[in-house]
Image (cartoon, helix red, strand yellow):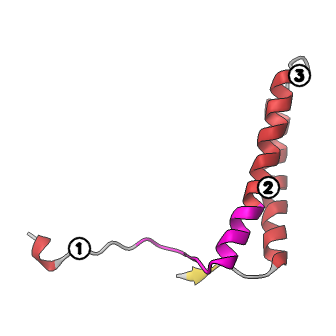
Amino acid sequence: MSMVPGTKDYAAYMVLWVGFFLAVPLWREFYEPSQPVWNVFLTTFLIALVVGTFFGVRYLQKNGVEVGEARFTSPDNDRS
């Protein structure tokens, strides 16, 4: 398993990636010119998504969380 890179540049890169490859296409797809309430909700949701990405990556960096494959172990007596 590997650690999330600890640089602030990595967090900024992830925010830009999520913003450019996820938030912008979602905005273009779901924007409705005649629905201002929906547009405010969509804007709030997409901003929260980008900000949440930043704080999520920073949390993983500060706590040294390892990201990788999940492995499950079972006691030997459970085998058939």
Q: Quadrant of residue 14?
A: bottom right
Residue 79 placed where, x, y %?
12, 72
For residue 51, which numbered disc appears in the image? Answer: 2
Residue 52 placed where, x, y %?
73, 55
Q: Secondary structure at mark 1?
A: loop
- Do labels 1 and 3 touch, CB within 8 Å? no
Q: Secondary structure at mark 2?
A: helix
Kind of residue at disc 2? Val
Residue wearing tag 1: 74
Residue 69 is covered by the magenta coloring: yes
Q: Is residue 40 left or right of residue 48?
A: right
User: What span is in magenta?
Assistant: 54-70
Q: Is residue 26 above or below residue 65?
A: above
Q: Quadrant of residue 4?
A: bottom right
Give the camera-side residue of 27 and 49. Answer: 49
Kind of residue at disc 3? Pro
Identify the residue at the far right of this view. Answer: 33
Residue for point 15% across, 79% down: 76
For residue 36, which numbered disc appears in the image? Answer: 3
Q: Quadrant of the C terminus?
A: bottom left
Identify the residue at the far top of this view. Answer: 34
Residue for point 85% across, 45% down: 24
